[in-house]
Amino acid sequence: MASLNRCVTATLTTLSLFFGMIVYLSKPASADDVYVDNNCRRNQSLPQDDRFTIFYSSQIRSNSQNNWFYAGRYQDGAVIFCISRPDFREARTLSASQIQNQFIDKIVKVPNRNATFIVTVAEGNGGRVPLTDYRLDLNNPNRPVLTRLRRRLGRT
């Protein structure tokens, strides 16, 4: 009987998480979305064809200054990487051409490294495509260091 209760509890929990994720992912654009243009400047009144929606952001400290590192996704899935001073001051695209305007699977900040990220680039926006991991070092945002780590076949 205890085994059946655990099975039912696990199933209900899984279903709740699944439906919650479906509701979250299917939500339309909201007032909380932040849009940037192709020069990384914030502009909430851009038409859909001209805007990137920020999906990742992180505050970093480099060269004794606070900066924002953020990424915006275009409607086709391509991503633009940006760097700015807080509040989008002095916004500009990041000079890391291998990852600009690519399909990004994920961005992860490296623990205990203030301005270092792992960026996973998908070679296409379909299911089982090659993925390449890069280490992006922004300790000097004017000269980002991008290092290719590994390439593998993505999941479906």
Image (cartoon, grey):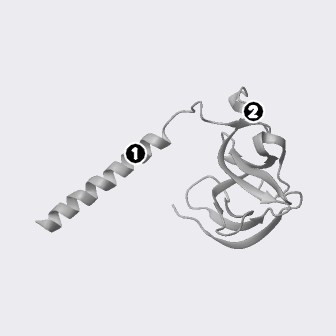
Q: Are marks 2 and 1 in contact (CB under 8 Å)?
A: no
Q: Secondary structure at mark 2?
A: helix
Spot occupied by residue 122 in the image (x, y as percentages of width and height) = 65, 59
At x 67%, y 43%, the residue is 54
The answer for how far apart the CA atoms under marks 2 and 1 are is 30 Å
The residue that disc 2 covers is: 50
Q: Toward the viewer: 64 or 49?
A: 64
61 left or right of 90 in image? left
Instruction: From the top left corner, tell me how far across and down residue 156 is, in percent.
Output: 51, 60
In the image: residue 66, left or right of residue 54: right
Indicate the quadrant where residue 113 lies. bottom right
How many residues crowd mark 2 within 10 Å: few (<14), some (14–19), many (20+)?
few
Q: Earlier in the sequence, mark 2 or mark 1?
A: 1
Up the image or down, 56 lies above or below 42; here it is below
- Residue 40 visible to the viewer: no
Residue 96, percent from left and from top: 82, 58
Residue 5 location in percent, x, y? 17, 61
Residue at horizontal 16 percent and vertical 68 percent from the top: 3
Residue closest to the far right = 142
**What residue is at 57 percent from the left and 31 percent from the top?**
30
Quickly name the residue at label 1: 20
